[in-house]
Image (tube, rainbow, N blue to C red):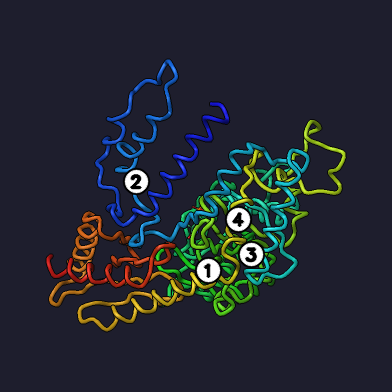
Amino acid sequence: MTPDEFRRLGHEVVEWVAAYRESLESHPVMSQVSPGDVRRQLPAAPPVDGESLDFALSDLDRIVLPGITHWSHPRFLAYFPSNASLSSVLADLVATGLGVQGMSWQTSPAATELEEVVMDWLRQMAGLPAAFTGVIHDTASTATLVALLCARERATDHSQTRGGLQAEERPLAVYTSEQSHSSIEKAALLAGFGRKHVRAIGTGETFAVSVDELRAAIERDLDAGVRPCAIVATVGSTATTAVDPVAELAEIAAETGAWLHVDAALAGSAMILPECRRLWEGVDRADSLVFNPHKWLGAAFDCTAYFVRDHEHLIRVMSTNPSYLRTAVDAEVSNFRDWHIQLGRRFRSLKLWFLIREQGVSGLQARLRRDLANAQWLATAIAAEPGWEICAPVPLQTVCCRHVPAGLDDEAVDAHNQAWVDRLNASGFAYLTPAVVKGRRIVRVSIGSEATERKHVEEAWAAMRRTVEHM
Ligand SMILES: *Cc1c(COP(=O)(O)O)cnc(C)c1O
């Protein structure tokens, strides 16, 4: 494709994306296709000869769009907000158009230095101390894996330079809440701790980790010769946005020498609001922290912010530094290839740069405050409605609820809630996620899509009530 053909088709593609965003409400929120529907429409073998991409646009409408679940839809209330603000979509186009690999400073100095600057903006926006340095990862899952690798290497005085974990005399344990994201367990397993040494600590009424149970688990391990290596705190759990007491966990980490990693993948965005920062009080004592600007904040996926207190340690664990990658300026610059697992890296900081410049901190704050207020409004409305229950505190933008018809036993109530949410989702009008929390089936209403205004939350709540009436 020549630049001139790109210009012509590119304008059409931008127009297509703009029209898509304008027409969101005309689509069913959850894709209505059945397994195989999309695949069946695609040729099984690649085209031998090239063809004009003019066809591609009509195929997007015909084949791809029906197979899309519309995460930007104003009544997308499932999972978590995954906003792709149009400013960051443009930045993504620029990043890809430049086609650079930002693995070392020298391979594109702007990619490194812009990232340093916007990650420091983000640090300031979230109210984090200057001791933290940030780097962009693809996802929270990989950042958490890196955190646990760093914890492992600190606890073993760099066992990887010797016999690795296999040569350690005492096993190392990782502690996290039973409500923590599956990526924590996955990271612990991948980092070699072994399922036997991953402790899922019980939670109390608010679904926050029980500090007493954590202390008891650590005691038991110490008695058995197992070393506490890392504590992973969750601020904003996946099921209910539960918030672990970070300050108390930091205290335990300090006493035991364990690494403290904070998983605030969703909730971190809220910390640009000073009134939310009490939720992670004590975070300044964490060793590492992850949050996803690609969730609620609005940077198009993927864009994860990983902050560490000791970046020298991170580099020591992650750097391989072969001779062919060394450059004369290495002492003066950051080479982000040494800050994470992969070598090659996209110019993702452009997405944050465009987003933050276009919205300003105040614009981003206003949108998040709107979402928090909508969640409070919905929680109040549900709590006031006979037959409905709020199932967890609502510190952020997710409302956990269920409908409890009179005369049903627990099992029947669970089945009823699964059934009405399935029916509502299948209707395409709104999309919510069912979840099981401590054995009970609940329904999560996760507010925070960029396009979601109060009116859409009201419409979804009306649809929830209508749906249960017709069960
Ligand atoms: C979304 C989420 C994750 C996983 O994020 P990825 O970036 O998809 O890996 C982890 N923890 C919490 C609390 C989350 O909300």
Whichever of callouts 4 and 1 sits on the residue coming sooner in the sequence is 1
Near-viewer residue (143 or 35): 35
Kindly report the distance in space between the C-alpha atoms of the residues bearing marks 2 and 4: 26 Å
Whichever of callouts 2 and 4 sits on the residue coming sooner in the sequence is 2
Would you place residue 343 above or below residue 279 in this image? above
Figure quadrant of the C terminus? bottom left
Tell me the element at label 3.
strand
Kindly report the distance in space between the C-alpha atoms of the residues bearing marks 4 and 3: 32 Å
Q: Badge 2 local density, few (<14 within 10 Å), some, or many (20+)?
A: some
Left or right: residue 305 compared with residue 406: right
Q: Is mark 1 within 8 Å of ligand 1?
A: yes
Whichever of callouts 3 and 1 sits on the residue coming sooner in the sequence is 1
Q: Residue at x 53, y 76 (%)?
A: 212
Question: Label 1 amino acid?
Answer: Val
Q: Which of the two marks, 3 or 1, is nearer to us in this view?
A: 1
Q: Residue furthest bottom?
A: 384
Would you place residue 34 above or below residue 372 in this image? above
Q: Which of the two marks, 3 or 2, is nearer to us in this view?
A: 2
Q: Residue at x 67, y 58 (%)?
A: 118
Kindly report the distance in space between the C-alpha atoms of the residues bearing marks 3 and 2: 38 Å
Whichever of callouts 4 and 3 sits on the residue coming sooner in the sequence is 3
Whichever of callouts 3 and 2 sits on the residue coming sooner in the sequence is 2
Q: Residue at x 56, y 46 (%)?
A: 92
C-beta proximity under 8 Å, tags 3 and 1:
no
Near-viewer residue (124 or 97): 97
Q: Badge 3 local density, few (<14 within 10 Å), some, or many (20+)?
A: many
C-beta proximity under 8 Å, tags 4 and 3:
no
Q: According to the image, label 4 marks what residue?
A: 354
Left or right: residue 359 compared with residue 179: right
Kindly report the distance in space between the C-alpha atoms of the residues bearing marks 3 and 1: 13 Å
